[in-house]
Amino acid sequence: MIQEKSVERQECDDYLARSADEANLQLALRKQHASTALIVTQGFEERSVGVLEMFAKAGVKLRAVVINRYADDTVPNTRYEERFERAADTVAAKRWSIVNNDYNGGWLTRAIKATDAERVIIDITGVSNRGLFGALDAAASSLRRISLAYSEAAEYWPKEKEWRKLNEDLSGHHTLAEIVDERPWLFGYDHRVEFIPGHEGYDSAGSGRALIGFLPFKCARLAAVLGKDDYTEFLFIAGRPRLPKNRWRLHALKKINEGIVKDWPVVTIPTFGYRKALAELSHLLFSERSLLERYNIHMAILGSKLQVTACWVFSTIVPSITIVTSVPFRYFPEAFSDGIGSKWIFPLLSPSN
């Protein structure tokens, strides 16, 4: 007997069939960009300027550049301000502007309206996970031809040498998770738990709640989400790195989160490849574990940018899912990531079309 697919499962399959994987941005530079605008967010990681500087170094001229700035967090996010402006001058002299960031996507709506470019490239590298949902909502509803760009870091924190040192600090009085949470890298210990506007979902009466949680390197961030609601089942997701040199990070991620995970299942999903992540989420929630049939689903989006993009697609197709995040009160900009790695681009398709 062949099981009939749900409408939502069919929509996920259709989206996967008509969408495209990430492509190397270096190859895309060969195309003409006279009618293209670039919208980029000025972050505290060096990689946030990577896409814009790639265009500048390649001699590409764009129709316009819009720089999105975090007006409420000026100190860490001004580190690369001069590089952003210098590169913008190179690729779009007298045709670049600035918008002030918000977290509901309004900044992107204003940025898109500020240009009449036929094609818009949105660099999501510097956008926070919290703000990415609103930005993608705005992009999908803009009716423009949108592509998303993304830059990896050359090296992420924690670095391998930091991971190797952790066991040396273990004692009978501290767990690995506690030691990691106290380390002055990535972000601090205190967090604010929030539902993502427009993706709050809804619960059906008579069903318990299950949490799908992406494992972070600092347990306190996920622990804050777990402490906010009464969940009856958990499924945890560990990110699988793209590069072989970073494979140790998957083991480290699972080891650090052992105290939270306990006996609940942990599955691995690629940190790179939003379509791969979407396909695996679809399989987990519709087929293998069929969690959507049995529970009200909450999803803690604490993974990579491309995993979050996959979660946005899934949440748009399945609006009952509640998207929750945990926002750190403090970041450590000097110990978040180092350098600029590979850069990617892919077309954004609206799941509702």
Image (tube, grey):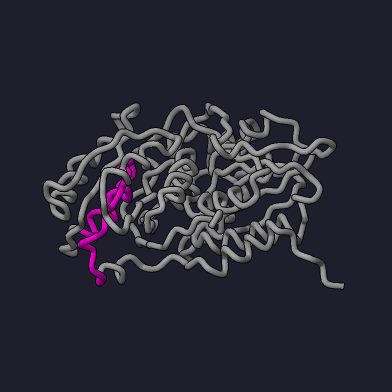
Q: Is residue 321 above or below residue 18?
A: above
Which quarter of the picture shows residue 14? bottom right
Asked whether, in this view, residue 96 is left or right of residue 152, the answer is left
Quadrant in which the N terminus is drawn = bottom right
| In the foreground, 346 or 77 | 346
Q: Position of residue 138 (x, y in %)?
A: 43, 44
Task: Report the side of 109 relative to 131 (left or right).
Answer: left
Q: Residue at 78% across / 44% down in the picture?
A: 295
- On screen, residue 199 versus residue 54, left or right, reads right
Residue 174 in view (yes/no) = yes
Query: At x 67% / y 48%, what residue is drawn?
Result: 236
Front residue (pair 181, 348): 348
Horizontally, residue 146 falls left or right of residue 267, namely left
Look at the picture and state if 56 lies above or below 85: below
Identity of the residue drawn at 36% across and 45% down? 126
Magenta residues (range): 30-55
Q: Is residue 337 magenta?
A: no
How far from the left and from the top, in percent, is residue 81?
Answer: 22, 40
Is residue 179 among the parts visible in the rendering?
Answer: no
Instruction: Identify the residue at image location x=35%, y=35%.
Output: 101
The verdict on residue 41 being magenta is: yes
Residue 240 screen position, x and y as percent: 56, 59
Q: Nearer the viewer, residue 196 or 233?
A: 196
In front here: 220 or 271?
Answer: 271
> Residue 73: which quarter of the image?
top left
Say if 61 sits above or below 139 in the image: below
Q: Position of residue 161 (x, y in %)?
A: 44, 50
